[in-house]
Image (cartoon, helix red, strand yellow):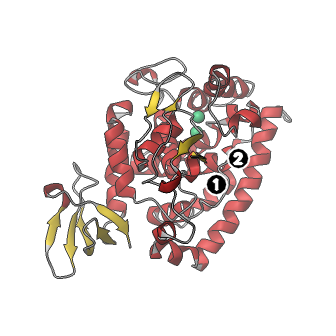
Amino acid sequence: MKAVEVKDLIPGMVLEKKAVSAGGVVVMNAGDTISEASITALRMNYIFSVYIVDESIPLPGGDGGEVFSSRSERIKNSPEFKEFKRRYEATVIDVKSRMNDIVERNSKTLDTEGLLREPLELLQDKSTLEIFDMLHNLRSYDDTTYVHSINVALISGIIARWARFSESDIQLAILCGIIHDIGKLSIPDSIIKKPGKLTATEYKAVKNHTIDGYKILDNYDIKGELKNAALMHHERSDGTGYPFALHDNQITRMAKIVSIADVYDAMTSARSYRGPLCPFSVIDIMIAEGLQKYDTRLILTFLENMGSTYLNNRVRLTDAEEGEIVFVEKNNPSRPIVKTDDGKMISLKDTNLRVEEIL
Ligand SMILES: [Fe+2]
Ligand SMILES: [Fe+2]
C-alpha cells in the first residue's frame, strides 16, 4: 500500500482504502479503479492523496512511459512552444507580484490594465487550438494558485470569445479569471499543500476563499463583476455550489464563465505525468458530471467549440484505427464523425468507439 498524491494518479491504479472527503462524502471505495472522472471527483472534494494497491502502480519506464503522445513531443520541441513557455514564465512572475500587492494592499488602486497586460500578450496571434495545445503541455509546472489563475484567465477569455462577447467583456472575463482565486493566497500553505485529508476546519478555510476573495477585492474601486467572480465561481446553476448555494439567475455571467474554465483546468492539471488530456474525454466527463450545474448557453458553447477545435485533426480511436475528424455534431461534441485512412466514415455516436488520442 502506498499513499499517492492525486496529481500523480494514473488511470488504472486501484484504491486500497476508501477516499472520504472532509465533509464525510465517500468519493471512492476500496477496490475501485482510478479513472479520469474519479481523479476529477477527488480534486473537487479537496482530497489530495489516496492509498493505492502497490501492484497497480506502473513501474517507471514501463507502460506509464508510453502515454506520452507524439503530438505532445512535437509541440514541446517546437520553437513556438519554447517562446510561449518563456512568455508564460514571465507572466507567472508578473501576475504573482501584482496579486500579492492586491492582497497586501500595497497600493490604493487596483491596476487592472497592468494585470491584464501579460496574459493578453499570451493570447495574441494564437489560435484556440494552439493555446490549448500549449497549456496542456505546460503541465510540468507546480500547480500553484498563480499558474492555475493564468490558465483559468486564458480559458475564460476563450470561452467569452466563443460566446461572442464584446472585446471589453472578453478582457473582463480574462481579468475575472486572474483574480478568481485571490482569496486562496491568504490560506496557509500547510493547508493548500497538505498531502492528506483536510480536517473539517481546514476544509471550511479552503471553501472560504470565495468570501475572502470578495473581501480583498472590495477594498478597491473596481467593477462588481470582478468581486462577484471571486465570490461566485464555485456556485452552480442547480444550487449545489458554495458559499451560498445560489441558483442560475443569481450567479453573474462572468462567475459562470470562470466556473467552467476552473473545472476544465482542474481536470487537466491532474496530468503532470503525461501529455495532453484528450479533449473528447474532458467533454465526456463534464457531461457525466451534469451539465445542469452550468449556464446552459455557456456550457453548450464551450463543449461544441472544444469539439470543433479539433476538426481536421488526426485521431486514434479506441480500437486503434486512425483517421481524421471530418464533422463534429453540435449535439454530440464528443462523438465526431471520423474518416478512416481507407475512406470509411465512422459516426462515433452510433458505435462504442471513442477518440482515444489526438495524433
Ligand atoms: Fe476557487
Ligand atoms: Fe480556481
**Is residue 156 visible in the rendered structure shown here?**
no
Q: Position of residue 256 (x, y in %)?
A: 46, 34
SS under mark 1: helix
The residue at which mark 2 appears reads as 115
- Separation of marks 1 and 2 at Cα, in angstroms: 8 Å
Q: Residue at x 42, y 54 (%)?
A: 12
Q: Is residue 197 above or below residue 311?
A: above
Which image quarter is the C terminus in? bottom left
**Is residue 236 visible in the rendered structure shown here?**
yes
Dot 2: within a 10 Å radius of its alpha carbon, few (fewer than 14), some, or many (20 or more) residues? many
The residue at which mark 1 appears reads as 119
Relative placement, left or right, of 132 versus 85 is: left
Q: Quadrant of residue 104?
A: top right
**232 vs 349, nearest the viewer:** 349
Q: Residue at x 81, y 39 (%)?
A: 101
| Residue type of the residue flagged with mark 2 | Leu
Q: Is residue 142 above or below residue 32?
A: below
Q: Position of residue 207 (x, y in %)?
A: 60, 26
Relative placement, left or right, of 75 versus 217 is: left
**304 vs 316, nearest the viewer:** 316
Q: Is residue 100 above or below residue 355?
A: above
Q: Residue at x 63, y 45 (%)?
A: 149
Q: How many marks?
A: 2
Q: Residue at x 20, y 76 (%)?
A: 340
Q: Position of residue 323 (x, y in %)?
A: 26, 75
| Residue type of the residue flagged with mark 1 | Pro
Q: Are marks 1 and 2 in contact (CB under 8 Å)?
A: yes
Q: Quadrant of ligand 1?
A: top right
